[in-house]
Each structure stands twice: as C-alpha cells, then as structure tokens.
Amino acid sequence: MVPTSVSPPPLRPPQVNMQKYQVALCQLLVSPDKEENLARARARIEAAADAGAMLIVMPEIWSCPYSLETLPSDAEDIDGGASPSISMLSEVAAARKITIVGGSIPEKASGKVFNTCCVIGPDGHILAKHRKLHLFEIDIPGDIKFKESDAFTGGQEPTVVDTDVGRIGIGICHDIRFPELAMLYRSREKYFFPSSAFNMSTGELLWDLMQKSRAVDNQLFVATCSPARDPDAKPQYIIWGHSSLIGPFGEVLAAAGHEETTAIGEIDLSMIQSTRESLPLEMQSRGDLYRLVDVQRQ
Ligand SMILES: NC(=O)CCC(=O)C(=O)O
C-alpha cells in the first residue's frame, strides 16, 4: 500500500501587487464561427477591463463549440505560436495591463489534443499553461453520454502560478470534482480558478455545491467561468452556465445566470487570512489520523 502524499516543489514567495481588486467572469456565448467568438471575447474582456477588472477569467472551450467531433480540427498550436485565440488574449492583456486566466481552448501538441488553459500576465506573456487533468466521462442512460477522452488527452501536472493579483491554482471544469487538487493548491496558499462548462444534468444539482465545497474546505476563493447556455445547442451537451465567485467563507461574491454576461466581483485577499484566523481549520485538522492509501480495487 502506497500512502498518497502532497509534496509540491517550493515556489518563490508570491509577488502580489494588489490585495483588493475586481475580477470579471466573462460568460460568453460560443458559436461555430471562431472569428466571431474571438471578436466577442475581445469586446467583453475590453469592457470588463474598462470597468476596472484587473483579473479576467474565461470559460472552458470558448473559441469553438464543445463538440467531441470538431474539437480536434479546432485545436491550435500554442507552443508553435499558431494560436489566434491565445494571441488575442495576449494582445488584450498587454494593451489593458491585466491578468487573464484564459479559460481553455483545444491545444494540439505532439500529435495529441489537450484541453488547455493559458494564464497571461499584464505584459502579454504566457505565465503558465494548464492541461485539464481529469477528463469528463459520463453515461446516464436516457439523459447524457459524453466521453471527453474521445477528443482529448489528459494533462499530467497541477498548475500553480504567481501573478500580479496573487498565487493562483488552475483547474478546468471536471478538475473541480477532485478535492485533492484544491487541497494541494491550498497547501501552496493560493486560490483556485476553474474554468468550466458543466452540463444541465449535473449542473443544477452540483455546480454550486462543488464550488462552495472547494472554497469552504480550503478557505480560499473559487472563481468559475462557464460559457453561456446556447438555446439552440444540440441536446448532446447543453451548458449549465452560472459562473460565480465564491469567498473563503462560502460567500457568493458574484454570480451569473445562464445567459451571456460578465459577472464582476471583488477579491480581497485579506479575507483568506481573516477567515483562517476566525475559523482555524488547519490548526484543528487531525492530520495524524488521516492517511489516504491506495487500495486495490476489485
Ligand atoms: N466539462 C466538464 O468537465 C463537465 C464536468 C461536469 O459537468 C461534471 O459533472 O463533472
């Protein structure tokens, strides 16, 4: 039996330039026309920056439809510098001097396709690239069947990145279901930004619960951004929407419905410290009793 342990490599101390700032969740309506998606995204990011947001969070798969059939042909070569979507995000980040958690786009690399989030700093450079770790598989007879691994290969590395607006742990949608990932991020003292595209079958019951659980268990901010629900979408995968910003005490600081919109809320990093002082879960934690072990599954 092998104990599971979380032993991240040391990070440099966070260089946070802002303790309090506005974050914008750009809940975009996505169409099959990539140029149109990029133009809509640009306009929404620029408007949010003009309204004062210093951090923008984008949805999972915002540059093209979230369709297993077309994702591979919509994939872009980020490392090869042939990614119109990431170039657009870099340009806007540099022009407005903002940080962007770039949701995700399909990325092609080494003959594979990944579901990839780029984090872009205010100089327009890519600070980090996260490839979705947990691919979504679901089969509820008569309701929904979806197998993300038909289109994507899973990533191999959790991603923690230091930005001007704090140390951020990145997740993409289904990544939020795995509490160990948020625990690992919490152990590195940061907050958690999954970009998401939950569906109607699981979204109504679980989306709000998942975000609040990850925030409250770990006493950190959780910001999620979804595409808007497309009323004309094929029944295969209808997006739930409901992007939101949850505080370390479980407070809803911003929330969208299912329509195209930008939800803006305030992150005050001092709330992490004050929540942890008021409710010192870490000190109360009985780490001496919890030991996760790999068990042989039958
Ligand atoms: N795109 C996704 O990862 C969807 C995850 C989801 O809906 C879930 O229930 O988990």
Image: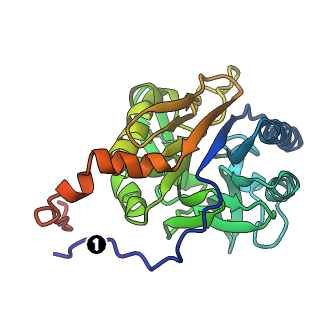
The furthest residue to the left: 289
In the picture, the quarter occupied by the C terminus is: bottom left
* 46 left or right of 131 in image: right
Nearest to the observer: residue 284 or residue 181: 284
Q: How is the image coloured?
A: rainbow
How far from the left and from the top, in percent, is residue 268? 54, 45
Give, as a three-letter code, the residue at label 1: Ser
Residue sitting at 71 percent across and 48 percent down? 54
Secondary structure, mark 1, is loop
Residue 288 in view, yes or no? yes
How far from the left and from the top, in percent, is residue 288? 12, 66
Q: How many labels does the image show?
A: 1
Residue sitting at 66 percent across and 52 percent down? 104
The furthest residue to the top: 231
Image quadrant in which you'd find residue 151: bottom right
Image position of 173 with respect to 6: above or below: above
Residue sitting at 64 percent across and 45 percent down? 21
Q: How crowded is mark 1: few (under 14 residues within 10 Å), some or many (20 or more)?
A: few
Residue under pointer 1: 5
* 130 left or right of 136 in image: right
Residue sitting at 64 percent across and 59 percent down? 116
